[in-house]
Amino acid sequence: MPKFTFMKNVLFCCLCFASISSFGQNGFFLEPGLGLGYTNVRASNPPDQYPFQYGAEGWYNRSKNIFSYNPSLLIGYKHKSWSLTTGISFLKTGYNEDQLYFMDLGTNEPNDKITEFYYHIMVPLIFSEQFNIGKHFFIRPGFGFAVSYNTTAIENFEETGIYYNAGAGKNQPLTKDEFDQIYFRFIGWEILRLQAGYKVNDRVNIIAGPEYQFMLSSFIKDNDNYELNRAATFKVGITWSFSKQTTPNPGNTPTEALKTLRQ
């Protein structure tokens, strides 16, 4: 009898595990999305003149946030509550800064404002875990890493003083040689995200939530200075599963399994 009871308990545990795992939506899924938010940098010194030469006088003012966007097309694989996602995304980073020139002329007002922005093609790898809240809602925190290919750097001048005649709103992109002299083409990033989701049907989920991306090493080729770009966005998207969600079999619930063993 004790041996039979032990075997019955083992079989009951196996049936319970099988019934619980049948709730998972396993398999591959597609995840398009769009993030909108702001970007800024942490830097030792700002560029004080085009093309982005770092100076020793330091910041005139703290850098200001500028608009950022982050469209993405990802593909992932989900097993039970865990998922792994990769793909391709596009990220805009940068900052705005007041410039101060001609201190010897007795002015303390900035002579112009410069907005610098950069474009990055990202390949992320994100790990996530899903926690279901009722039948339709869930939350899915995640973290990961990315490698970016940094394509372009542009400086926009907005003239505010009377001494520096750069021209309001004039964009000056760096040439390929200038970019390669000042910036690294490839940079590693860390990604933090928190998504909330709503299950529409067996294939489609609507997702939304904040995402934070920041460089793991300096963007500039300068041993005496550093620049770390970062972006915080609110991303909205969908997940579309290639296979329908597995529907639990009422006959495989733990209660039914226990009834079967008792019979």
Image: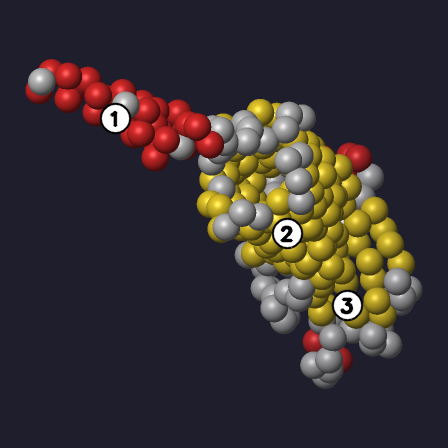
Question: Pointer 1 and pointer 2: residues touching (CB < 8 Å)?
Answer: no
Task: Name above or below for residue 36 compared with residue 33.
Answer: below
Q: Which residue is mark 2?
A: 208
Q: Picture quarter containing residue 64? A: bottom right
Q: Which residue is mark 1?
A: 262
Determine if residue 89 is in view. no
Q: Which of the pair 111/137 is nearer the observer?
A: 137
CA separation in Å, label 2 and label 3? 34 Å
Mark 3 and mark 1 lie on one chain; the one further toward the N terminus is 3
Looking at the rendered image, the disc whose residue lies closer to the viewer, 3 or 1, is 1
Q: Check disc 3 and give the amino acid type.
A: Lys
Q: Position of residue 47 (x, y in %)?
A: 68, 56
Packing grade of label 1 (10 A; few <14, some 14-19, many >=20) is: few
Looking at the rendered image, the disc whose residue lies closer to the viewer, 2 or 3, is 2
Q: Please name the residue shown 74% across and 75% down the image.
A: 110
CA separation in Å, label 1 and label 2? 46 Å
Q: Please name the residue shown 85% across and 70% down the image.
A: 159
Q: Check disc 2 and give the amino acid type.
A: Ala
Q: Quadrant of the C terminus?
A: top left
Q: Picture quarter containing residue 44? A: bottom right
Mark 2 and mark 3 lie on one chain; the one further toward the N terminus is 3
Q: Quadrant of the N terminus?
A: top left
Q: Which residue is mark 3?
A: 113
Element type at marker 1?
A: helix
Element type at marker 2?
A: strand
Q: Position of residue 7 (x, y in %)?
A: 19, 17
Find the residue positioned furthest to the left: 2
Mark 1 and mark 2 lie on one chain; the one further toward the N terminus is 2
- Classify residue 69 as left or right of residue 205: right
CA separation in Å, label 3 and label 1? 79 Å
